[in-house]
Amino acid sequence: MKVFVTGSSGFVGSHIVRELQRAGGAVYGFDREPPLPGASPDEYNAGDVADGDGLAAAVRRIRPEAIVHCAAITPAIDELRVAREILLVNVQSTMTLLEAAAGIRCEKFVYLSSAGVYRDPEPGTALTEESSVDDGGSLYAQTKLASERLLIWARRVLGVITTSLRVGPVYGEFERPTTTRSRMSPLYRAVHLARNGDVLSCNSWDSTLNFIHGDDVGRALLAVLNADSPGQTYNVAGAPVSMRETAEAIAQLYPETRVDWSRDVSDPTLPIRLPDRPVSSALIARDLGVTQGITLLDGISRVIDAGTLP
């Protein structure tokens, strides 16, 4: 399958490029930045998804059988300062790609969304694809929801087979700060602290997160691309893991790791947003047989062995 991937040099995009190539796909990347070592697409196209004409022209020239839209500006501390850029990159590019896909009769379109679109669940319940979304959330979350709704429209009006993947907290070897990614995952921060000899402290060691390795996201994407009639929306997340279990796993790999296990920390090095937001991936497991393949310990080991931490 010939696949066009936006954000192909980004964190999640690099994992997806690698998984597509492992499966034998011909990958055409599109990104402002050059590919990372170990995740070079078969053809790299330098470009900005905010440039609608350039983006559409690349799709028309390549004529892919599938489009995977990963490019996005992730949550920023100062959203207002870059609000217009976020809108262009996170929403307008989606419309450009959907129209281009319809124009060349592209078979599949997969959008990398986020589990951050959901409202906080009731205590003791998991977030499913039927859970309420947060229409009052961050600008990033609103742009993800806007693009998801464009995909629904495109299915009905343009006849493009579209699927949104609401991805949980991703980690992996290709994570690093970029111009469009300033907020690192808790797992990245924890490994970075341990490696540098800093103390790991947390405001809630019992809080859980559904960490998912980037390669598992790539596997979920492959399952969607290979399905005849994939669903409209799927959650993609790992099993719930507490911050305590995360720190213990890191300590197994870095025996010199220093951890402050106290519960009352005024300025934790690993601040966690409360309450817990468990994400269920039962639907994609039922429909497409996708399950988590990489354990937390193995995934952290891969991050450490890759040597990509600054």
Image (cartoon, helix red, strand yellow):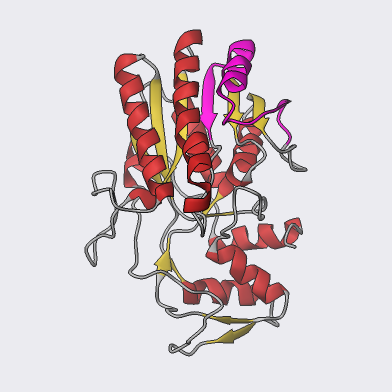
Residue at figure coordinates x 74%, y 56% from the top left = 306
* Spot occupied by residue 114 in the image (x, y as percentages of width and height): 42, 46
* 293 is within the stretch colored magenta: no
Residue at figure coordinates x 23%, y 49% from the top left = 132
**Observer-nearest of 53 and 123:** 53
* Spot occupied by residue 86 in the image (x, y as percentages of width and height): 50, 42
225 lies above or below 129? above
**Boundaries of the magenta span:** 40-69
185 horizontally vs 58: left or right: left
134 horizontally vs 37: left or right: left
**Tally of marks:** 0
* Spot occupied by residue 54 in the image (x, y as percentages of width and height): 62, 20
**Observer-nearest of 119 and 39:** 119
* Spot occupied by residue 211 in the image (x, y as percentages of width and height): 49, 58
Residue 3 occupies quadrant: top right
272 lies above or below 212? below
Q: Quadrant of the N terminus?
A: top right
Q: Quadrant of the C terminus?
A: bottom right
Q: Look at the image and tell me whether residue 288 can be seen.
A: no
Residue at figure coordinates x 29%, y 18% from the top left = 156
24 lies above or below 304? above
Q: Look at the image and tell me whether residue 142 can be seen.
A: yes
Residue at figure coordinates x 44%, y 48% from the top left = 140
Judged from this view, the residue extending furthest toward the front is 81
**Observer-nearest of 19 and 275:** 275
Residue 206 occupies quadrant: bottom left
